[in-house]
Amino acid sequence: MLVLFQEARVLEVSLFVPCLVEDLYPEIGEASARVLTRAGAKVLYPRGQTCCGRPVYENGHFDQARSLARRFIDLFENAGYVVAPSGSCAHMVKHCYLELFADDPAMLHKAKDLSSRTFELCDFLVNVMKVVDVGAYLEGRAAYHDSCRVGRLLGLKKEPRILLCGVRGLELVELARPDACCGFGGAFSVRFPEVSKTLVADKVADVMDLNANYVVSAEVSCFMNLKGYIEAHGLPVKALHMAQVLDSGKGS
Amino acid sequence: METKNSDFRTRSAKACLDVHLGQTLKKAACVHKAKTDKAFLKFERVEEFRALAHEVKERSLSKLPELLTRLEASVRKAGGVVHWARDASEANAIVLGIAAKNHVRSVVKGKSMVTEEIGLNKALLDTGCEVLETDLGQYIVQLANEPPSHITAPAVHKTRFQVADLFAEKLNVPRTEDIGELTLTARAALRQKFLCADMGVTGANMAVAETGSIVLVENEGNIRLTVTAPRIHVAVMGIEKVVENLDDAAVILSLLARTATGQTLSSYTSVITGPRRDGELDGPYEFHLILLDNGRSAIFSEPALREILYCLRCGHCLSVCPVYEKVGGHSYGGVYPGPMGSVLTPLLAPVGEADDLPFACTGCGACAEECPVQINIPKLLLALRAKNPKGKKGSQTFAWLAGHPGAFRAAASALRGLDPKLEKTRRAPILGRPLRAWAKNRSLPRLKKPFSKRWPNLEKELGKLRDKT
Amino acid sequence: MTSDARETILSRLRQGLKASSGPELEPDAQAAPSSGHEKPRPDIPDHDFWKKFQEELKSLNAQVFSAKDLTKAKEMLARILKEREVKSAVIWDHPVLEALGAARVLRDAGVKILPDASSREGFCSQAGAADLGVTSAQAVILESGSLVVRAGKGLERSTSLLPPVHLAVVADAKRLTHIPNLAGLLRTWKDEEGRLPSAVHVITGPSSTADIELVKVLGVHGPLKLIVLMVLEGDAG
């Protein structure tokens, strides 16, 4: 196995804990922190985090989104790198904040600064820390789901795959339609549950077609969606978040 | 436009149960993807042209009043007549007026979304005129008395067996399931109609202010027949479709067929400038262009929404939309389905009717990535959602909580104490509904000891981990 | 008659322009400079152009014949008429077809040329009764494998549309390499009053549809068959 430690620097990284992670999947936060530490970073955790504002933004409630964005920008103003195990949250900060403050030069300046320091987890590991092997070990076949906000909106298609290839024991298999939407789409999943269900059912069927043991996502909401569907139907496949995969095999 | 509360939820839920529809739509999407991927592989400058096309539309709209008056002058110079219609009923009245004046008894039509939008067929039929759709897919849905389900493939939801039954019943021909034979049947049935029709009605993909031309794009040849055989040609066009000059038109043409059907150009791209000239033996004696507003000037006046007016009606966004692929065109309730329809229909329909459509989107971004004129549809949908008071209270509450971490933590803590598996909350008002909707097909996540409480131990663990590494 | 509507619509739009702000709306914006993408590239040698053009045509299900001179072209035309058992045809009145002697070849092959002076029906109906429509193509586009035909006196639209077979003679045609070149070409076709021809059709393959189950069928309203007879004498453009 190739172990590529091209450049492991001791960086300080502030962990951005998405709201879904805080209360529903804290283990993803823990896994992310351990993975970053193993990669050589010093993980910090600014207190008082609640939500980046994405859910209200997607409802078109921009004033509410701006108030949460201001708070968030403040909270991380003096942080160095900010890393989130979530594409939708990272995208919110990196891109949507700039739109929210397009007419407010002072806030826009701060938002741009924060944007330049904020990364999704796989992006940070591969492109900033230049780490592709975090010493993980997990046996089995894994199918990677290209979440819309990770693959398409953030352009991160190779990074998760590179990291998965670095996991010992893991065979990465490609779905027939890896970037087909899993049907979560935020409130879409509960406003139009029938359509949402059809989409997630299709995605999971695609995973089962490959006899994969795991379906992996770098986006918390997709993970929640896939996991929920799989468990409700008792299917022989496990949904995992990237952070969990990368944290595997090290006494986790 | 026939939108009466699109009720996307009910229609889409029903569509999801239609196995045949699902298979058809999936096949259509895959075929489309293969064709367009191939077309774009051959076209190295696609990104450059998308940006150019966006700029063409942006510039055209920035000068819209001026271009429309220039267009009018150019059409007149070419011997055509220009009419202006504020809304659907004015547009229909104009067409009926032209028909009445010229003793028109039969009309043939090229496929035109805008004439669907204004309900022209019904207006003509009500006067006793015969109206025949000539695009094969449109002809099929007309015979079946259904609305079209897709912009470029109106009968994509029908099987050959359904078409076989339809033709046998309505056209009194021996039943055949062979697609080639079915097509020839339609060709023969419609050919006579073309030659006898008094008036041909089309839309227009673009109009060129420089020359007073309209541009028509098709594969079948029915539009060419519509503008060649009958003695009168009426073109109905949304005011947003005018471009400044022939170069602009050519930029659009460089992309249109590629995204619509994966062809470099459609079989027939026609540039029509006025009626026939002296000495010509075919073509219409009269050319009429009806410039239709019908809500477009209102969209134009809202900068946050104006971009939807760039739409070329190529249908590409439908073919890449994961939601459309599952639910098909009829679920959207109006003339324009899919991503572009989710923006346009609520804006053209009476206020409030179709305000569920902007939410019928997962935000995946495929449409924006693929649109030939780079319309940021997800952004437009957010702007539409912003206009809707639905859920505002919820957002305000959430935002307040998220702005007060102490309260947020207390609420989460209380919920975890009382109902970690969210079983009781499922029956609660307000929060219960989304939870129940989720729980229909998925297990609900559990509230656990939050990350913030775990941090002190985690911090120590990380310290040890750092020392080891 | 619609002047009220006209004024209302224009004034709504002018109001709408005033109401908007933002750098993307500049009413004085000039048309984008040509940036060179629409200029024909003269450095493609004749031979390569026509070779590539033929390949494009073939990929579109068009049948292509290539003759190195008019005599050979005449022979090919005669052969096509015989093979296809053409009984009647409509034909353009165009210098290229005259130089080829196409009408003569048709008559010699026993093909009846329509319209029949004795019939009272319109040109379209006559063309609809023909087995074959013969036109030239005033221009071609390499990028798409297209023929460009323009309407005019003696250059009927129906000829390339109604008969089940359309035969286009390509000789002395303007060569466009890319679709954006169309703009410049069309401008050269403006008359003394600055008007474009009443109809210009860019023909790219035969008529087709895939409206039933996405299965492609040729010849739904327009011609089923497109035949291109290229005459590539020394200077073919």
Image (cartoon, coloured by chain):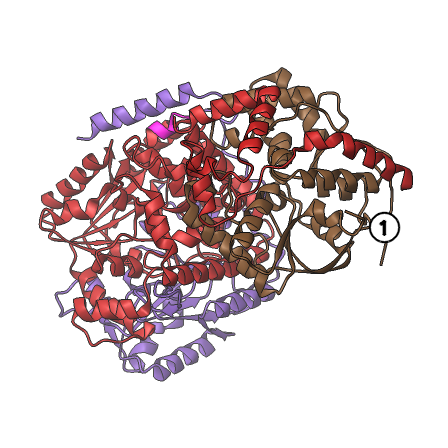
Camera-nearest residue between B91 and A122: A122
Residue range of the region highlighted in magenta in the rendering:
B298-302
Which chain is assigned purple?
A: C
Q: Residue furthest front?
A: B418
x, y (%) of residue A104? Answer: 58, 17
Left or right: B3 in relation to A105: left
Camera-nearest residue between B82 and A71: A71
Residue at 36% x, 22% y: name it: C14
Residue at 46% x, 39% y: name it: B435
Quadrant of the snapshot with the N terminus of chain C: top left
Q: What's under tag 1, amino acid-wise?
A: Leu
Which chain is assigned red?
A: B
Q: Can residue A102 be spotted in the picture?
A: no
Which chain is assigned brown?
A: A
| Location of mark 1 (residue) | A4
Please say if B318 is above or below A176.
above
x, y (%) of residue B293? Answer: 29, 33
Left or right: B179 in relation to B360: left
Res. B118 image quadrant: top left
Q: Can residue A55 be spotted in the picture?
A: yes
What secondary structure is the magenta-colored segment mainly? helix
| Secondary element at image label 1 | loop
